[in-house]
Amino acid sequence: MGATAILFPGQGSHEPGMDAPYRGHPLLERGLERLGEDPFARLDEGTRWQQPALFLVSVAAWDEARPEAAAAAGHSLGEYAALHAAGVLGFEDALALVDVRARAMAEAGAARPGGMVAMLGGEEEDVRALAQRHGLTVANDNAPGQLVLSGARDAVRAAAQEAREAGARARELPVSGAFHSPLMEPAAEALRAALAEVEPGPAQVPVWSNGTARPFGDVREELAANLLRPVRWRETIVALHDGGVEDFVELGPGRALTGMVRRTVRG
């Protein structure tokens, strides 16, 4: 029997009512007290509240299940839940970092307007060439046939209009900024300052980094850098599978990551 990896979703997997099964859970209630605000009541306001809400649901789901695992990984924001589950970040530290990250990304999105578009299907080379032509970053390599481009809003819209030329279907994402692109530099600086105040602990299981598709080394440096680097999710899943992982358990709302795993690792 193969090993198990636990996976935690990122922004976009949030949904109304996702907190209902975990109301009264100690971690969720402690998180609400620390935040001094109920993010679940403000999900429609975007990044600023969606990220803390998703983190709280993810760690509560993990705390209830606590499956035996040989590795952990998280998609973008999900890295913070994965690092907490592995014992690298204490709950208060992880929540404080998520709170800073969410606020800083929302502010960077307002100051430097941008967007993201998912490109579904098409040849990878053609989609990457389309991104380069419009000065966009390939922000997410989620699964075969699923790249996400990020950058200035006009460039995102222009690329979306040309998607068919690359053999792809375009779907603009309802996000407040150009995540995982150079436009997030002010947010990375704010996060880097917050990370300097945190002392990570040893990992009980390896946690795989989005930016390198390898286990985290310098957690503080990599978390800040990952705000600007592409999410190499497909490569991460392939590497975990090649390393002996056969079972992937998604903890949190939705099943977006489960679908990506199935597209990446057939069967």
Image (cartoon, rainbow, N blue to C red):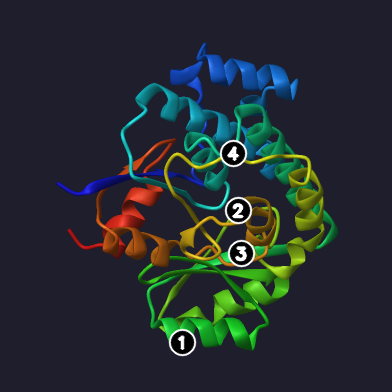
User: Which residue occupies the extreme right position in the image?
Assistant: 111
User: Which residue occupies the extreme left position in the image?
Assistant: 1
Q: Check disc 3 and report the residue beneath it.
A: 116
**Amino acid at circle 4:** Gly
Q: Check disc 1 and report the residue beneath it.
A: 126
What's the residue at 52%, 59% (across, down)?
210
- Residue contact at pointers 1 and 3, CB within 8 angstroms: no
Q: Check disc 2 and report the residue beneath it.
A: 174
- Identify whether 58 is placed above or below 232: above
User: Which residue occupies the extreme top position in the image?
Assistant: 24
- Residue contact at pointers 2 and 3, CB within 8 angstroms: no
- Residue contact at pointers 2 and 4, CB within 8 angstroms: no
N-term mark: 1 or 3 = 3
Q: Nearer the viewer, mark 4 or mark 1?
A: 4
**Amino acid at circle 2:** Pro
Task: Indicate the secondary structure of the residue bearing disc 2.
Answer: loop
Expressed as whole percent of the image width and height from the top left, the position of residue 102 reads: 71, 43
Quarter of image, res 144: bottom left
Disc 4 to disc 3, C-alpha distance? 34 Å
Residue closest to the eye, 196 or 136: 196
Disc 4 to disc 1, C-alpha distance? 42 Å
Expressed as whole percent of the image width and height from the top left, the position of residue 137 reads: 62, 74
What's the residue at 55%, 85% (across, down)?
130
Q: With 151 as the anchor, is 147 left or right in this view?
A: left
Q: Check disc 4 and report the residue beneath it.
A: 201
**Amino acid at circle 1:** Asp
